[in-house]
Image: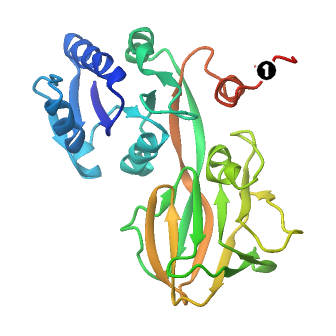
Amino acid sequence: MKIAIHGRVFSDRAFPHAQYLFDELRRHGAEVIIYRPFAKMLHSRHISCGDCAEYESPAETEGTDLFISIGGDGTLLDAVTFIGSREIPVLGVNAGRLGFMATTPAEGIKEVLQPVLDGNYTIDSRSLLRLESDEDLFEGMNFALNEFTITKRDTSSMILVHTYLNDEFLNSYWADGLIVSTPTGATGYSLSCGGPLVMPDSGNFVITPVSPHNLSVRPIVVPDSSVLSFRIEGRSKRFLVSLDSRSKSVKATARLTVRKENFSAKLIKLEGDTFMRTLRNKLNWGFDVRN
């Protein structure tokens, strides 16, 4: 089995567990490749990765059977970008903070590693969205697991985002920006801007304005079969568009369209690891002493 280890900087508490992971993979005879910047960080902390090969581009991960992401949700999003349309299963190990997608705690590696290597898990297929534009903004990696955003860039003034749903005018959002979220991303940026939580398999997009000026404007849930297009106005001639944590500056004249991607992200789930359990644990539901 060929396994890619994807990671970034994480807390000191996770380092012993990372060493355990490499030791166990070596013991099982797995072929391991590791993200090069992550390998450099581990070496600086005297974590032994053995004779693991390294990668720094998606092409260098060809033939991989499994990704293990060690970090937070941002690290897992980065791993999904590397995986792309190959739909390789990815296990998210939480060595960060909240971890809505990376739900396996670092200290839980000992319990989950053997079932994962044995294939005793289920796949949670998460929908992605795709950005289409009149220029190649993201070098072919124009998809996102969490959200697409349009935000102001060079001025404190609000922007006007004219939004169309299946070519029919929906609304002109006068705001700091606009978020189009997948169900997975509904627990992220959209939630912090007042968007609703939706179940991962609900088949929706959530359109959430960022600090809208009009108090009557609220988030709206639309089917993910919808095609959304945008026209931007503002004092600046350039604006910022983002796919998850990746951002690019675009001209005000840019043509932007968002639709559902034709492939999905395959998140590894083990027994008892459910979305509702994650919500309760991460949002502290039920912990109110009055309950």
Q: Residue at x 52, y 71 (%)?
A: 241
Whether residue 6 sits left or right of residue 159 in the image: it is left
Q: Residue at x 53, y 72 (%)?
A: 132
Q: Residue at x 29, y 29 (%)?
A: 3
Between residues 159 and 48, which one lies in front from this camera angle? 159
- Quarter occupied by the C terminus: top right
Spot occupied by residue 92 in the image (x, y as percentages of width and height): 45, 30
Spot occupied by residue 94 in the image (x, y as percentages of width and height): 46, 28
Whether residue 268 sits left or right of residue 53 in the image: it is right
Q: Residue at x 31, y 38 (%)?
A: 9
The image's colouring method is rainbow
Whether residue 3 sits left or right of residue 46 in the image: it is right
Q: Amino acid at mark 1?
A: Gly
Return the residue at label 1: 286
Q: Dividing the picture into quarters, in which one does residue 199 lie?
A: top right
Q: In the rendered picture of this protein, how many numbered marks are placed on residues?
A: 1
Whether residue 260 sits left or right of residue 35 in the image: it is right
Q: Is residue 199 above or below residue 249?
A: above
Spot occupied by residue 276 in the image (x, y as percentages of width and height): 72, 26
